[in-house]
Amino acid sequence: MSDEKLTDQQYENLRAVYQQLCSSRQAIDDFRAKLLVFLPLVTGGIFLLLNTLNDEAKQFFGVFGFVITVGLYFYEFLASLKCDHLIEVGKQLEGRLAINGQYTERPVGIAGFVNEAYLARVIYPAVLAAWTFLAFVFSERQVALIIAFVVLAIFFVVPRFLKLGQWPI
């Protein structure tokens, strides 16, 4: 916390910035949460609808679903980075405002590591593995499951190697 005494105007300006920062982070968190809920639901729904299609069309949807999910996966990385930055700025502002708010008093997650970022790290690779399986099961039936598990493993550990966000081991 800063020992510097703020004028009333400085305090109000910082408070306004802090409120905007809170709104921005909440909007990002809300969107991320919606993606985490809807991605598996939509994927499952599409899988049910695919029963009416031939094998080639199913494979196309597998590739298409994989590509779209990879885009959302990396969008999640960017959103995680933005949130991490906003949290750090929020801590600084709380120090300047002499308050213990949502940034200074953040919970560490279930068991110290299960948080929003960890859940995203589980859900996205699982959905990517499902799309991969669909893309390969009709032409490479014997190896489709192996390829899907490899995709699951790769996309689970990618954040660790890229060191993006706070996606734990």
Image: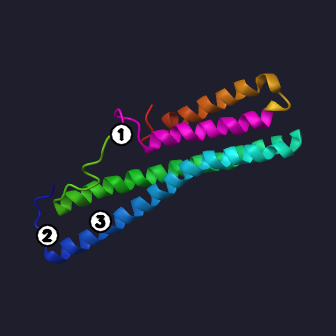
Q: Reply above or below: 53 against 138.
A: below
Q: Residues within 10 Å of mark 1 (few under 14, many from 20)?
A: few
Which residue is located at x 27 percent, y 54 percent?
91
User: Label 1 amino acid?
Assistant: Gly
The image position of residue 144, as x and y in percent, is 76, 28
Q: Is residue 43 magenta?
A: no
The answer to whether the residue labelled 1 contacts the one labelled 2, judged by CB atoms less than 8 Å apart, is no
Q: Secondary structure at mark 2?
A: loop
Label 2 sits on residue: 6
User: Label 2 amino acid?
Assistant: Leu
Q: Which residues are magenta?
A: 110-136
Q: CA distance from mark 3 to mark 2?
A: 15 Å
Q: Reply above or below: 133 against 95.
A: above
Which residue is located at x 11 percent, y 63 percent?
4
Q: Quadrant of residue 153?
A: top right
Q: Quadrant of residue 102?
A: bottom left
Q: Which mark is residue 109?
A: 1
Viewer-proximal residue, 4 or 88?
A: 88
Which residue is located at x 36 percent, y 36 percent?
110
User: Label 3 amino acid?
Assistant: Tyr
Q: Residues within 10 Å of mark 2 (few under 14, many from 20)?
A: few
The image position of residue 1, as x and y in percent, is 16, 55
Label 3 sits on residue: 18
Of badges 1 and 2, the one in the foreground is: 1
Q: Tell me which colouring the rendered structure shows.
A: rainbow
Which residue is located at x 41 percent, y 64 percent?
24
Q: Is residue 100 left or right of residue 23?
A: left
